[in-house]
Image: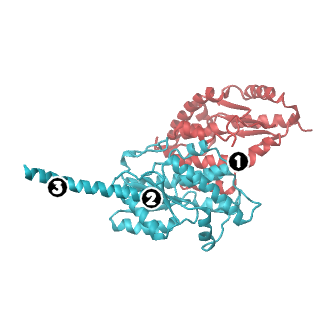
Chain colours: A cyan, B red
Amino acid sequence: MRETYGVVLPELNRAELTGKLIVIEGTDGVGRSTQINLLKPWLEQLGRAVLDTGLSRSELAGRGIKQAKEGHTLGPITLSLFYATDFADRLEKAIIPALRSGFVVLTDRYIYSLMARAIIRGLDPGWVRNLYGFALRPDAIFYLRIGVDDLIPRVVFSRGFDYWESGMDLYPSEDMYEAFRKYQAALLAQFDKLAEEDGFEVIDATPDVHAVFRRLQDGIFRVLSGEPRAPLFATEAHAAAGDKAKEKESKAAAHAPAKEAEQEASR
Amino acid sequence: MKRYGEHRFPGKLFVVEGIDGSGKSTQLMLLHQWLRAEGYGVVFSEWNSSPLVRDTTRRGKKKQMLIPSTFSLIHATDFADRMEHNIIPLLKAGAVVLCDRYIYTAFGRDVVRGMDPKWVRGLYNFAVKPTLAFYFRVPLEVAMKRILSGRAGVKYYEAGMDLGLSENSEESFHLFQARILEEYEKMIPEFDLTVVDATLPIEEQQEQMRQHVRAKLAQAKRLRVAP
């Protein structure tokens, strides 16, 4: 049965949630939505119904959050709670019904981005954990990981620096470039911590879009076929070693019946 | 991030709690008048949260979009905004702050709506612990008589209609308030609430309240401003 992070929502029957919940996490500009746009049609071709969802898209609070961010008047606790309201609305009104209907839910970010942002703004990690205690544990969390140096050209040459993505509320005296570096470095450090605590599967996001897509396909395919997950922080080398081990296993498995047959015959 | 009980401010915070019809607002108004007359810098926290949080809460209620989790979280958002932008700065400035309802209201309603009691308490952990929290204890029947005679009708969420206890709003309100009353009883020892018997004459309740408040203000003479 699907687990939560400690608290169960009222009248939620977790046994009914037969779908798969797959999270794509990663910092701003790392290419999450590009990947989701590739993954959705691929999954649909495999015959899976897909719900794709993301942050601050709830009917209840989505609009309020956008306005709040334009005025930047909310304090850090208030803003965190506002995001949590939005998340709860999406969880209960979109994600849970889809899981109940057996969908694959692909979510562009989940509680981890929200937790990372709150924690680097000085909120108590224990308080933040409790806040999202009602969240469902996903089947897999793919973390698209990138260093600040690789991230900067992507952001500069696509959409430029954004007030919030640069953490200007945290570093108001810096210029956007300096603030962006500091803010994203703090976020990435927090993500690495969460990756360990919550068992993210880390995917190096520096190669080209298709290489990253193939890694995600492998991971998702594994989740859908119910295979156990790859080891935490699987690097390319590890993953390759894992593949080789798998090959050996499958060869061994393929040989086994043949051997038995031989033995049968010799008897 | 300071937790409940960890804040140290020069100001004082007095809150009133109780079900609708317990008379708590009347008592707070009388206390306000008295404190002002005594020359204290007293502020009645008006619950004016920022328009964007307020609009979301209102829209959610009007369109009946709220479910227990979002009902709880949007009210916590609203409360956090008042705490960060209103109550804490006032307490820092040394004011006597009065609040009609506080976190205990949320603990009662949200738990009755099925949210985990520990989770809700954790959610509001950022709140300043009041100097005194008065609980106006009243039997349900007395409170009902006071309310239903004076009001045109109860609103959807006020009556707990979202819980599906009854199709009839008056009956639903009755059942909902009875459950909240049970939650309040549990909170008296847990949060050291100061219980006032709300069936006593108004002036007697007020006298008790003033005695408690006087004892707390005796140590804080400098809160007094010139009349």
The numbered disc on residue A258 is 3
Tell me which chain the residue with mark 2 is part of: A
Q: Which residue is mark 2?
A: A237
Residue A3: percent from the left, percent from the top?
43, 44
Q: What's under tag 3, amino acid-wise?
A: Ala
Tell me which chain the residue with mark 3 is part of: A
Q: Is residue A71 above or below residue B139?
A: below
Q: What's under tag 1, amino acid-wise?
A: Arg
Depth check, mark 1 against mark 3: the one in front is 3
Q: Confirm whether circles 1 and 2 share one chain.
A: no
Secondary structure of the residue carrying numbered label 2: helix
Name the side, left or right, on which A78 lies relative to B69: right
Residue A130: percent from the left, percent from the top?
56, 42
Q: Which residue is mark 1?
A: B82
Depth check, mark 1 against mark 2: the one in front is 2
Residue at the spot 39% in from the left edge and 69% down from the top edge: A41
Residue at the spot 42% in from the left edge and 52% down from the top edge: A139
The Cα atoms of the two marked residues, 2 and 3, are separated by 32 Å
The reply to whether residue B60 is in sight is no
Name the side, left or right, on which B173 lies relative to A230: right
Q: Quadrant of the N terminus of chain A?
A: top left
Q: Quadrant of residue B187?
A: top right
